[in-house]
């Protein structure tokens, strides 16, 4: 009897305590509570408390029936689902806020497939019987700091190539000076074309078509290559293709691997001027699903290399990568960019500042004059920590893009552009793909950076689709975004 009295007393105090703190009732409390009661109502009470465990809704356990409880639980589940849906819709709105996405703000966008994305038009004729025999294309690239030319055959064989690097000029001036770059292109272009033809053991009369980069890039530099190619195509009456530089980077991954890299696939384009995630639907058909809000990854590598006094001619990436091999990747705490932004965009400007401040702090601690005077060990730690954080940012954005693509049964990734030559990036992204059962196709490192074969191969892919341009009417475009072709709800951001 006395035991029963104690139990009743305990029951009433426990109940009032639990109903007053119901919002925080833990499963352990709930279990103890039902054990104390030890009767058939325990189940309904357990349900009561589990229903209110993580919510702020108050439900009085004494007055609600099982039906009412189930209804309350359903309503709560519905409310949570709606909230999740609203958050997802909000996230989707962010996707594609990247600068590079065509929202009608650009005068010229790349649209070789017409408004449908598939209606290719040949404007200057195609090689006769091109589908029954391999054909050869002379490609010219002068969008930035390297003058490149190559003769490539339509079965993917590079017959001959030549590249005039301007690294020594940039090393001397501490970066690219457009006027100097233009002068160097003018000086080198004839020689580079001649060398490529000679090495391929062919002539301008014999080749079947000409392709040249017409954008995006430095206007002064693009013009040198474009004018030369247009003139040659007109003089020798050759089919002509105006190449989009970024498409050429992407298609380069197919040069040796057309079966492994069939459309559609996801492309991560990382270069000195660009940082984008693209859903590649076909030649001339790309949907930008993320881009950089400020700096590109290549630019960030170059600035960090300069900060540490490394050679920057031809880009500071290779020197920084080499130095990072000797450093501790977790020695310097750095912040991974855009942690709160749930989209596929990138930002590298903050990391650039972050690494500069970290170097300044080390300079103070070590009592030296500048980052250039830091020990090799400190510099290697800075380089390794920078690279590790930069790659973490890539990985995070990539995983999000991969999840989106998986819903559309896309599970192949290509990584292209100059920065894709980086072995550590290739290794880490390959691991990511292995973990998610994706396949990854990357061009050989030397074909990741700018060279002539990329213009030849992109022209071959376009010619095969029945697409070419008019050399008498070809302009160049410093900014030349992909037109936005997409019809899937996931990436439709209008
Ligand atoms: P662009 O951006 O003018 O088209 P590229 O596509 O050739 O030129 O990319 C050049 C960029 O790639 C430079 O910023 C360079 O530092 C970077 N890069 C080249 N090799 C590496 C590497 N191994 N690691 C990191 N970055 C690299
Ligand atoms: Mg490039």
Image (tube, rainbow, N blue to C red):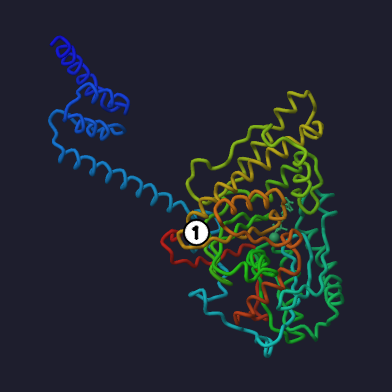
User: Can you say whether 415 is above or below 258 in the image?
Assistant: above
Q: Secondary structure at mark 1?
A: helix
Disc 1: CA contacts within 10 A as few (<14), some (14-19) or many (>=20): some
User: Where is residue 77 shown, x and y percent of the image?
Assistant: 28, 43
Q: Residue furthest top?
A: 2
Q: Is mark 1 within 8 Å of ligand 1?
A: no
User: Can you say whether 12 is above or below 203 in the image?
Assistant: above
287 left or right, relative to 149: left
Dividing the image into 4 quarters, which one contains the C terminus?
bottom left
User: Where is residue 196 shown, x and y percent of the image?
Assistant: 83, 73
Residue occupying image coordinates x 63% and y 58%? 269
Tell which of 170 and 244 is nearer to you.
244
User: Where is residue 68 shown, x and y percent of the image?
Assistant: 15, 39
Tell which of 58 and 115 is nearer to you.
58
Q: So how many labels did they put on this image? A: 1
Residue occupying image coordinates x 83% and y 50%? 171
Figure quadrant, ligand 2 = bottom right
Residue 275: which quarter of the image?
bottom right
Dividing the image into 4 quarters, which one contains the N terminus?
top left
User: Can you say whether 289 is above or below 232 in the image?
Assistant: above
Q: Residue furthest bottom?
A: 128
User: Can you say whether 309 is above or below 440 in the image?
Assistant: above
123 left or right, relative to 45: right
User: Where is residue 211 shown, x and y percent of the image?
Assistant: 71, 75
Q: On the image, numbered disc 1 is attached to which residue?
A: 405
Residue 351: which quarter of the image?
top right
């Amino acid at each position: 009897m006395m035991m029963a009295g104690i139990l009743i007393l305990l029951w009433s105090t426990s109940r009032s305590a639990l109903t007053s703190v119901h919002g925080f009732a833990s499963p352990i409390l709930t279990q103890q509570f039902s054990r104390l009661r030890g009767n058939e109502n325990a189940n309904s009470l357990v349900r009561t408390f589990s229903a209110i465990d993580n919510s702020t809704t108050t439900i009085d356990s004494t007055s609600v029936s099982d039906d009412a409880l189930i209804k309350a639980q359903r309503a709560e589940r519905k409310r949570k689902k709606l909230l999740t849906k609203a958050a997802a819709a909000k996230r989707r709105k962010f996707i594609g806020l990247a600068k590079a996405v065509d929202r009608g703000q650009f005068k010229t966008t790349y649209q070789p497939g017409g408004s449908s994305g598939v209606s290719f038009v040949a404007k200057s004729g195609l090689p006769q019987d091109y589908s029954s025999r391999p054909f050869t294309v002379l490609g010219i690239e002068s969008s930035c700091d390297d003058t490149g030319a190559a003769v490539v055959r339509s079965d993917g064989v590079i017959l001959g190539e030549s590249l005039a690097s301007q690294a020594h000029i940039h090393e001397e001036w501490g970066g690219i000076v457009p006027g100097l770059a233009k002068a160097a292109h003018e000086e080198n272009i004839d020689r580079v074309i001649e060398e490529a033809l000679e090495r391929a053991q062919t002539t301008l009369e014999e080749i079947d078509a000409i392709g040249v980069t017409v954008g995006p890039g430095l206007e002064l530099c693009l013009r040198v290559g474009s004018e030369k190619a247009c003139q040659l195509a007109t003089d020798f009456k050759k089919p002509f293709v105006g190449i989009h530089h970024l498409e050429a980077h992407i298609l380069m991954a197919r040069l040796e691997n057309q079966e492994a890299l069939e459309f559609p696939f996801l492309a991560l384009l990382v270069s000195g001027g660009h940082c984008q995630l693209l859903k590649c639907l076909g030649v001339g058909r790309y949907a930008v699903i993320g881009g950089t809000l400020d700096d590109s990854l290549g630019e960030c590598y170059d600035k960090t290399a300069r900060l540490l006094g490394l050679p920057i001619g031809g880009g500071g990436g290779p020197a920084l990568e080499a130095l990072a091999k000797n450093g501790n990747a977790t020695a310097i705490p750095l912040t991974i960019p855009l942690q709160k932004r749930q989209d596929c965009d990138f930002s590298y400007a903050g990391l650039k500042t972050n690494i500069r401040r970290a170097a300044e702090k080390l300079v103070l601690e070590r009592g030296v004059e500048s980052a250039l005077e830091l020990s090799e060990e400190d510099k290697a730690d800075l380089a390794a920590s920078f690279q590790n954080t930069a790659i973490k940012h890539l990985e995070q954005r990539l995983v999000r893009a991969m999840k989106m693509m998986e819903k559309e049964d896309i599970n192949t990734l290509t990584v292209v552009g100059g920065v894709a030559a980086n072995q550590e990036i290739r290794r880490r992204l390959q691991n990511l793909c292995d973990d998610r059962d994706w396949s990854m196709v990357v061009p050989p490192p030397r074909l990741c950076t700018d060279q002539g074969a990329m213009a030849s191969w992109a022209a071959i892919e376009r010619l095969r689709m029945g697409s070419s341009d008019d050399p008498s009417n070809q302009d160049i475009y410093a900014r030349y975004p992909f037109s936005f072709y997409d019809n899937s709800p996931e990436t439709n951001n209008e």
